[in-house]
Image: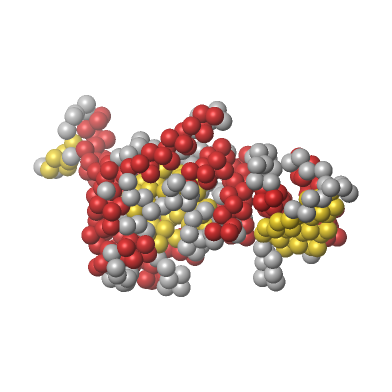
Amino acid sequence: MGKKSEAGNRGKDIRSDCWMSLELTDSGGIQVSLTSKVDVMYGESLVELCQKGLDHLGVEHAKVTVEDYGALPFTLMARLETVLRRVRPDLTKELLPDMQPFCTYDTRRDRFRRSRLYLPGDEPKFMINAGIHKPDGIILDLEDSVAPPHKDAAQTLVRNGLRQVNFYGAERMVRINQVPRGLEDLEYIVPHNVHVILIPKCENVDQVVQVDERAKNLLKEHKISKPIYLMPIIESALGAIKSYEIATASDSVVALAVGLEDYTADIGTQRTPEGRESFWMRSQVVNAARAAGVQPIDTVFSDVGDMEGLRQSVLEAKSLGFDGKGCIHPRQIAVVNEAFAPAETEITKAKRIVRAFDEAQAQGLGVVSLGSKMIDPPVVKRALKTIELAVATGKLAENWREEEE
């Protein structure tokens, strides 16, 4: 046959990954040549995994070479499927690892999305321990962080990661490629308990509708009743102008995010620490999101070494009305979560409003007042959210009402 392909990463600095080559042959069965630092302990099981995997995929004769750098089974299975797909593009079978019980939890529409950590979809080493840093969300990225030749490899790796990696309760997110290419990505993520799909470079309603309809059709095909939510990313002048239309394009949209690198390039300027060049766009997105009843999420802070700069950036984003911010390094998560937590003055004010609301409810009153001032429903709603966030971040006891009686 003589059909050959390769996939994965190799080199002295590679960890938690493997490089693999495959050649289909006419005879000889499945021959696996393995090089691994853990050959003594796990060599036989790794070879057996390759043999059984190819047998499952319908391959009888092949030569496989594996350079292992500590890859977990889900990674090795993804690389194996990828090398075979590259010589057999019409392959319909999948090499799926078991869905682990800790990968089956749900999300909810109105959960906190203060911090979301971007991880390149073709780098398993970043996935494995990401959840221990406690971000609100983990984004497995199929778009900008993945080079074009590795897009197919990232699809299978992200799919297997969704089935095997413990994210410790973080919302399970995937950023797909730009529509229409991103519609193909949905085949690899929708059936595997993805919570939120990020739609990059979103500029019109049709992009949202296409993703939404395809995702819902896949859920129906796989008999899955859980909803999947959408987070369009606004990254251009046109996207900013149409941000309200985008936010209201589907009831699956739960947030609008901002991407400033592409936006500033689109308007012919560069990002600055002061952010004057993006003030209108960010304000536009915040207002569009609020008007649509979804969460506005700010862009990433690119200097991973400047923690004070990050904190100030979060406080500025919070003052503009944003609910969350992107992270590109785990060390940013704690700073973002803490800076988005309510200040003591906010908590004190919220407690007074909630007490007044509770008293009005107990007396069957339809109007809430604090002293001589009437409290509108949106103010009560915001106060309740402040209390919920204060409890979630440990700034207020869950039974605070009882403690203060």
Q: Residue at x 66, y 70 (%)?
A: 13
- Measured from the top left, where is residue 55 in percent x and y? 79, 42
* Left or right, residue 333 beside residue 90: left
Label count reads 0
Residue lying furthest right in this view?
A: 28
Please name whichever residue, 48 or 295, is drawn nearer the observer in this view of the structure. Answer: 48
What residue occupies the far left of the structure in this picture? 372
Percent position (x, y) of residue 181? 48, 48
Percent of width and height locating residue 219: 51, 32
Residue at 67% over, 48% down: 85
Question: Where residue 299 sits in the image (x, y, percent)?
Answer: 37, 59
Frontmost residue, 41 versus 211: 211
Outermost residue toward the front in this view: 1
Colour pattern: secondary structure
Residue occupying the point 35% across, 35% down: 251
Above or below for 137 versus 330: above
User: What's the residue at 48%, 59% (across, down)?
Assistant: 144
Quarter of the figure with residue 20:
bottom right
The C terminus: image quadrant: top left
Q: Is residue 364 visible?
A: yes
In the rendered view, does 377 fall on the left or right side of 78? left
Above or below for 360 versus 330: above
In front of the other: 1 or 164: 1
Q: Tell me, yes or no, if residue 398 can be seen here.
A: no
Q: In the rendered image, which quarter is residue 262 located in?
A: bottom left
Q: Between residues 34 and 207, which one lies in front from this camera angle?
A: 207
122 on left or right of 51: left
